[in-house]
Structure formats: structure tokens, C-alpha cells
Amino acid sequence: MEKWYPESKNIKVGSMEKFSNKLTDYFLRKGLIEAKQTPWCKYMIMHRVMDVISLLWLVPIGSLVAPWYISITFVLSYRFLRSRTGGFHAKSPLGCLLAATVTQLIGTSLVSRIESTLLLFCILFFSSCLIIYLAPANNPELHLTQEEIQALLPRIKMRLFLLWLLIVVLFFFVPLMATSILVGVATTALLLVLSKSKIGVN
């Protein structure tokens, strides 16, 4: 099991923490998890709930400044990548949601504004190099071992390769969708830079 989650004592999320504690206790009583897995389980519950809530929020928000399919493509592409790379998170769920909202609005609005193909692929190349160099994020809260980091690297490269492939294919059929994925890759790189700069938490 990958030990990429922060310890439960570092998570302060009020009612969401209470919900995750109750659900984790239920899983523990039913024998679905072991006692040593409780920090991981609490974090995963909060992480998944926040993922669903933010996705339901971000897609409509992005649709205010871009077509709905661009909003979906953008948010899914950078989440697909950063689920392995890690990166910036605000220090509270509300702060994280606000940061994600700003990211969604800026990212989706940029998709139709970058028209130079050369510039787009320069951004993609530079962002990919940053991701390969910086990922995975390993702030003190994560406690990734060297072995775990090495195990993540090929998965990150594979996901990056798949996004490159999608970009190239979609570029000939739906250029805006290709651009939205490209901006998603660039967003992942930016979030890694912020994380490595010790801004926010993982």
C-alpha cells in the first residue's frame, strides 16, 4: 500500500473529519480494515468526498467561461495526472476548494486564448520536463520512502505519455480539447512548483 497520505493528526477539517472518523470506525468494527490502516482510511474518505464535491462544483464553474466539454476535459486531465504527482493543496478543505475554483476558471479561460501551436507545444514540453523532474511531491507530511518514490515514477511517466498521445490525436480533430489537456498538464506542473516551494500542504 502506498504511504502517500498525511497522518490523521495533521488533518483538521471539522465536520468532514467527524464523518470520516465515524465511517472509519464502522469499517474497523466490521473488520474491513486493520487498526494500523485507520489514518489512511480517514484521509482517503475525506479525499474522495472532496474529489466528488469539487468535481460537481468545478465543471459548472468552468462552463461559465468555456464550453462544458472543455471544462470537463481540463479538470479530468490534471486530476488524472496529479493523483500520482501530488502537488499544492491549501491548508483547509474550503481553501482547497477556493484554490481549485480559481484554477478552473483561469485554466478553462486560457484554453481558447492560446492560439500559437508552437507556443502550446513549448508549454507542453517544458511542463512535462518539470513534472518528470519534480514529481512526486514529497512534503514532510507525506513521508514517502525512496522505494515508494521510485515506484511512482514509471506510473507518472505513463500517465504523462497517455496525455501526450491524447493531445496529439485530438489536435487533428478537436483542437480545443487537445489544448485543454495541455493546459491541464501545465497546471499540474505549476502545482508541483508551488508544492516544492513549500506553499500549501500535500
Image: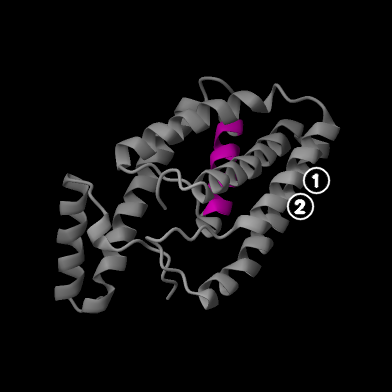
Relative to 121, does residue 87 appear above or below in the rendering? below
Q: Which residue is mark 2?
A: 165
Mark 1, secondary structure of its residue: helix
Q: Which residues are magenta?
A: 70-82
Q: Which residue is mark 1?
A: 168
The residue under the point 53% across, 75% down is: 146
Dot 2 and dot 1 residues touching (CB under 8 Å): yes
Residue 116 quadrant: top right
Mark 2, secondary structure of its residue: helix
Residue 155 quadrant: bottom right
Q: Position of residue 162 (x, y in %)?
A: 70, 56
Q: Is residue 71 magenta?
A: yes
Relative to 75, does residue 24 appear above or below in the rendering? below
**Cα distance in 3D space between marks 2 and 1:** 5 Å
Q: Residue type at mark 2?
A: Leu
Label 2 neighbour load within 10 Å: few <14, some 14-19, many 20+: few
In the rendered image, the residue lying farthest to the front is 197
Q: How many marks?
A: 2
The residue under the point 46% across, 48% down is: 198
Q: Is 66 on the left or on the right of 54, as rendered?
A: right
* Depth check, front residue: 174 or 50: 50
The residue under the point 59% across, 38% down is: 74
Q: In the image, which disc is placed on residue 42?
A: none
